[in-house]
Image (cartoon, helix red, strand yellow):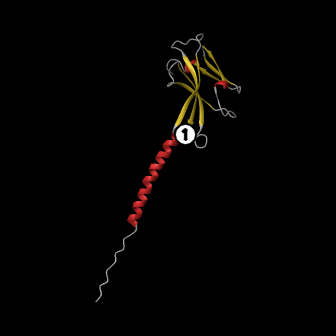
Amino acid sequence: MRHVAESRSRSPWPARVGLLLIGAAAGAVLATVLGAGLGLHRTTVLARVTQPPSVRYDDGSYQVMLRRSQTLGAPVIGGTSYRFWVTRAGNDGYGHSVGVDIDGVDRIERSSFTVTWEQAGVRIRMRSAHELFIPATSFTRGR
């Protein structure tokens, strides 16, 4: 009598599940790295105009800065944005900011605008004829 060995075939599911879990973990790591990388941005101060001595505010002197923020991968994936910041002189980290988005203007640089300090606030005139007025109440006394 012949004994036929029963062959136990292994199910391919455990191997597939393992590969699926490894792939999912690798995908999650890759998505995290790419997401973090694409979310990074670089901010550059393009111009700084300090308040003249002829204009005085009760709580100190101020400056206007033009900042450009670029997201990693700009302009293909991210973007470029511009903001005017009015901050206390010597403090670049805290102040009042206004975003600038002017159609037809690809780059804003120091030669693109003039700054006029007034007791009532600061006036920024663009070469494109746009004008921005930031009242002193928006940036003085820690606002």
Q: Percent from the top left, x then y, of residue 35? A: 50, 44
Q: Percent from the top left, x then y, of residue 119? A: 60, 13
Q: Percent from the top left, x then y, of residue 115? A: 64, 19
Q: Quadrant of residue 99?
A: top right
Choose between 115 and 43: the one closer to the eye.
Answer: 43
Q: Please, what is the three-letter code of the amino acid marked with disc 1? A: Leu
Q: Quadrant of residue 52?
A: top right
Relative height, residue 112 to residue 32 (above, below): above
Q: Secondary structure at mark 1?
A: loop
- Residue at horizontal 39 percent and vertical 60 percent from the top: 18
Q: Quadrant of residue 106?
A: top right
Quadrant in which the N terminus is drawn: bottom left
Relative height, residue 23 to residue 54 (above, below): below
Relative height, residue 25 to residue 135 (above, below): below
Residue 26 appears left or right of 104? left
Give the residue at the far top of this rendering: 54
- Residue at horizontal 59 percent and vertical 38 percent from the top: 79
Q: Percent from the top left, x then y, of residue 25? A: 42, 53
Q: Which residue is mark 1?
A: 72
- Residue at horizontal 62 percent and vertical 16 percent from the top: 117
Choose between 83 and 38: the one closer to the eye.
Answer: 38
- Residue at horizontal 43 percent and vertical 59 percent from the top: 20
Residue 123 appears left or right of 12? right
Relative height, residue 69 to residue 21 (above, below): above
